[in-house]
Amino acid sequence: MKPLPAGMSAVTIRDIANDLSMSHATVSRALANHPSVKPDTKLRVQTRARELGYVPNGLAQSMRGTHGPVLGLVIPDIQNEFYAAMAQIVADAAAARGFHLALSITEDDPDREMGDVRALLVSRAAGVIITPTSKARTETLEMLRGINAAQLVRRHPGIAHEAVLIDDFAGVASATRHLVNYGHRRIAYVGTHPDISCGLDRHEGFRSVMAEYGLDAGHTALGPPRPEFAQHAVTSLLAAGNQRPTALVVGSSSLTIGALEALRGLRLRWPEDISLVGYGDPVWFKLIGHGLTTVQLPVQEMGRYATSLLLMRFEGSSTMAAGSTGEASRFAPSLVVRGSTAIFPHSPQEYQARP
């Protein structure tokens, strides 16, 4: 293949797509390293992009147009280490493309969310990455409908933009199956309430594995993603004497903090008194005791992809890349086994899956 004609303006994603006879959406995803694109396709696209002299230049694009060199990130909580890490990743990825990050923290307040989205719209932000509240206002949904946006971690039924998600069902299912394979029968789950999409998926992952092995999934508490809720819930779940759960799965990093506080308050050791699997993997998970077994989340991949998705749409002068409306891109978590889980003193054969 030959280079594009001399004197042609800066190479765009659409130019690359036309040159390779591929769709704009496929080229965008290949350049963003989306997991659904085959490795050979990624290599072909990225190689040709270099040959054609493709250089992402969001700042120059924004100066020529009506948008400012700003990318908005609207998240519920900066104290949650997942979102703190995500903010850093998005800020770095945006800066590499000539954009500044405008950070909004909603505390899951739909009115605050509405005001922050309005401010980003007024400032003509080039794009918005948002973790939507479960009860987003109608005005918020209307504003998001008309801008370049992507959903992150959660998926709201009233927002048509692509959602960049964790495979939460698989993450909690792997944690639960790990405990079952260690011989645990009474397993408890503490997670976020199901009106948040990720909360629903995580709870379903727990319920599915428990049903597969014919085990009781009733030792469950669902509520807001706050440490104080988990502290109260775990204390209540473990107050059942000899019938208390022998293992616990926690469905968020914030809830894991509350669960650990509850175990310390009850003077329970892990894994000697109870096996524990957390969610997320901040650095300190490795440092407490013999390390916390946990569901490790693909924060780097998600943050970089969401940022690239928005900025390449913007560069292509398209609010929504072809074929992306309403799609969900799910990134796989992984179970990291450390010292907080142990084999229960019964034969694991008792708990094999029913046919």
Image (cartoon, rainbow, N blue to C red):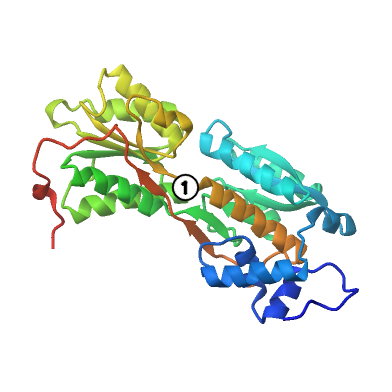
Residue 197 falls left or right of residue 30: left
Whole-percent x, y for residue 120 in the image:
75, 46
Q: Residue at x 56, y 62 (%)?
A: 34
Whole-percent x, y for residue 353 in the image:
16, 56
Where on the picture, by quarter, is residue 230?
top left
Q: Callout 1, which amino acid?
A: Ile
Where on the picture, by quarter, is residue 77?
top right
Which is nearer the eye, 121 or 260?
260
Residue 114 falls left or right of residue 252: right
Quarter the C terminus occupies: bottom left
Residue 22 falls left or right of residue 278: right
Q: Residue at x 58, y 42 (%)?
A: 86
Crowding at dot 1, Cα within 10 Å, few <14 / some 14-19 / many 20+, comes out as some
Q: Count of labels shown?
A: 1
SS under mark 1: loop
Residue 157 falls left or right of residue 271: right
Residue 130 appears in the rendering = yes
Q: Is residue 89 above or below residue 291?
A: below
Which is nearer the eye, 94 or 77?
94
Quarter the N terminus occupies: bottom right
Circle 1 is placed at which residue position? 196
Q: Residue at x 61, y 38 (%)?
A: 106
Which is nearer the eye, 139 or 192?
192
Residue 146 appears in the rendering = no
Whole-percent x, y for residue 50 in the image:
72, 66
Q: Is residue 104 above or below residue 241?
A: below
Q: Residue at x 68, y 43 (%)?
A: 92
Whole-percent x, y for residue 337 in the image:
32, 40
